[in-house]
Image (cartoon, rainbow, N blue to C red):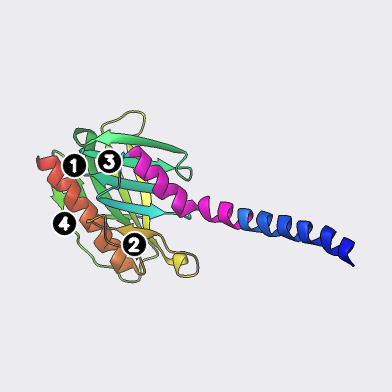
Amino acid sequence: MEETIKVILPVALIAAFLTTAFFFLTWWMESERRLRRAMKNALAGEPDMHAIAPSEGKAAGLDLLNEQLAILWNRGAIGLVFDFDEIDGGEIIVDGHVVTRVRRHYGRKELDVMVEDAETVILRLLFNSPQCPEFEISLWRATWSTEAAPQSVHAPATSGPRQTRSAGEGLRQGRRWLAHIEALAKS
């Protein structure tokens, strides 16, 4: 009996350790956490404002102090950091239609519609870069009601995450992004 316990106990301890390590690794490598860590590394600190779409593996973040905007894709494995003067504008696209835009030299086209039952709300960021002239990130997709919704946070960085739970909230998040981009274009 003692010999059996001497064999079973180490095997049980190893199994418990491996299970714990597996769950920790799964937690650590989860898409949203990877994107948050990558964003923090890209901007050398917490962003003042960011949008994360874990199901797409994309994120965008603004660092107002250092005047930078970072975009990430491929779950944070690939990304670019732009200075504010490289940002050309932004657009909000609802169900395939541009509903509002801000461009550096053209001003702002105001939001014409508020669609609470939209299928998609996408933020398109525009850059003065031939390598990456635009970047799109979803702020809302109707399919997220059955999946994990992306996290959206607006300044200050100390505030907790807020899930984008509706198309209207996605539009409001997009308008905040465009307000920042418009302020940057004017400065």
> Residue at label 4?
110
Choose the circle earlier in sequence order: 1 or 4: 1
- CA gap, disc 1 and disc 2: 21 Å
The secondary structure type at the circle numbered 4 is loop
The secondary structure type at the circle numbered 3 is strand
Residue type at tag 1: Leu
Pick the residue in front: 96 or 102.
102
The secondary structure type at the circle numbered 2 is loop
Q: Would you say residue 106 is visible in this rendering?
A: no
Q: Would you say residue 44 is visible in this rendering?
A: yes
Image quarter of the C terminus: top left
Residue type at tag 3: Leu
Q: Nearer the viewer, mark 2 or mark 3?
A: 2
> Residue at label 1?
65
Mark 3 and mark 2 in contact (Cβ < 8 Å)?
A: no
- CA gap, disc 3 and disc 4: 23 Å
As drawn, the label of residue 69 is: 3
Magenta residues, start to end: 22-42
